[in-house]
């Protein structure tokens, strides 16, 4: 028999209130409440980017490093639009709730996200407490591998024609050699991604996890679906290895392993409901 929703909510609130450490997992669904587009399926992607529907190109086809070699203006049309969108979009209040929870934890917190929008840092999470497994749009790398390393996107502006989704010159250039720059994001079939920044973040995460010992750990996962299951697998594996409680927040795919907690809700609604219980002192 399935556990009633109210009982799941009670168990989730109790797990958060009694935890000593918080691990936050976040997928694309975390950004939907901020107003970011849902790329779920071809039609979700095409609703956000109508010109690509006419060309029959889905998200996987566009998130391909080959465009930077064959048609840089087309490549930067897609990623430049995303860069501008993420810059002007404010993280929703759920980020502040998670940060408040993190501050209450005796052993603090860490974020693991497949999102590339940089919104956890913008919401006040310390950069050394965030692991971005697919990189981040706030950073770039040289397409010629000149040795300059990873550099910030901050100085660059990308102007995109939103009827064609093509970027106009000048396109972002490497500060070392002047060659075309690209986002430091792991794309599909990407053999050229410089994963050194994400690897260093991963080292910080592993050090934090080792430091926990037997501390009570709660894992709050928001908006991580099955299409790209990186975060879901990490959450389940970590909960199993460390004996933590996993709270999976996902309106469409809330299924969890035995004894874990799935909430079929959007991220912001669930975080607000859990926070209200904790703040009231009566989970």
Image: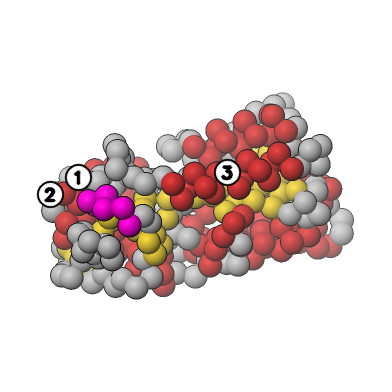
How dense is the environment of label 3, judged by Cα within 10 Å: few (below 14), some, or many (20 and up)? few
For image coordinates 57% across by 43% down, the residue present is: 203
Q: Position of residue 162 (x, y in %)?
A: 21, 67
Q: Position of residue 169 (x, y in %)?
A: 15, 70
As measured in the structure, the alpha-carbon distance from the residue carrying label 1 to the one carrying label 2 is 6 Å
Are the residues flagged by discs 3 and 1 in contact, CB closer than 8 Å? no
* Mark sitting earlier along the chain (3/2): 2
For image coordinates 65% across by 34% down, the residue present is: 238
Are the residues flagged by discs 3 and 2 in contact, CB closer than 8 Å? no
Q: Is residue 127 magenta?
A: no
Per the image, label 2 sits on a secondary structure element best described as: helix
Q: Position of residue 107 (x, y in %)?
A: 77, 51
Judge left or right: residue 200 versus residue 271: left
How dense is the environment of label 2, judged by Cα within 10 Å: few (below 14), some, or many (20 and up)? few
Judge left or right: residue 151 versus residue 21: left
Which quadrant of the rendered structure holds the N terminus? top right
As measured in the structure, the alpha-carbon distance from the residue carrying label 3 to the one carrying label 2 is 35 Å
* Mark sitting earlier along the chain (3/1): 1
Span highlighted in magenta in the image:
143-148
For image coordinates 31% across by 71% down, the residue present is: 156
As measured in the structure, the alpha-carbon distance from the residue carrying label 3 to the one carrying label 1 is 30 Å
| Residue picked out by circle 1 | 66
For image coordinates 29% across by 72% down, the residue present is: 157
Are the residues flagged by discs 1 and 2 in contact, CB closer than 8 Å? yes
Per the image, label 3 sits on a secondary structure element best described as: helix
| Residue picked out by circle 2 | 70
Q: Position of residue 233 (x, y in %)?
A: 55, 33
Nearer to the camera, 45 or 210 = 210
Q: Which mark is residue 112?
A: none
| Residue picked out by circle 3 | 203
């Amino acid at each position: 028999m399935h556990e009633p929703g109210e009982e799941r909510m009670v168990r989730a609130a109790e797990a958060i209130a009694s935890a000593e450490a918080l691990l936050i997992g976040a997928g694309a669904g975390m950004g939907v409440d901020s107003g970011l587009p849902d790329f779920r399926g071809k039609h979700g992607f095409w609703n956000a980017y109508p010109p690509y529907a006419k060309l029959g190109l889905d998200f996987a086809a566009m998130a391909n490093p080959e465009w930077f070699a064959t048609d840089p203006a087309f490549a930067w049309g897609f990623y430049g639009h995303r860069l501008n969108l993420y810059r002007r979009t404010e993280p929703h209040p759920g980020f502040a709730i998670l940060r408040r929870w993190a501050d209450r934890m005796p052993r603090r917190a860490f974020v693991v996200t497949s999102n590339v929008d940089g919104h956890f840092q913008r919401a006040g999470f310390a950069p050394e407490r965030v692991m971005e497994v697919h990189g981040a749009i706030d950073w770039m790398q040289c397409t010629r591998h000149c040795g300059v390393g990873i550099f910030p996107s901050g100085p660059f502006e990308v102007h995109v024609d939103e009827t064609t989704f093509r970027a106009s010159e000048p396109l972002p250039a490497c500060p070392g050699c002047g060659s075309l720059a690209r986002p430091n994001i792991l794309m599909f079939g990407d053999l050229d991604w410089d994963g050194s920044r994400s690897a260093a973040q991963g080292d910080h995460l592993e050090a934090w996890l080792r430091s926990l010992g037997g501390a009570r750990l709660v894992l709050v996962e928001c908006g991580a679906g099955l299409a790209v299951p990186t975060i879901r697998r990490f959450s389940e594996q970590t909960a199993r290895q460390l004996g933590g409680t996993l709270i999976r927040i996902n309106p469409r795919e809330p299924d969890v392993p035995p004894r874990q907690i799935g909430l079929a809700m959007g991220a912001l609604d669930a975080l607000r409901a859990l926070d209200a219980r904790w703040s009231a002192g009566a989970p």
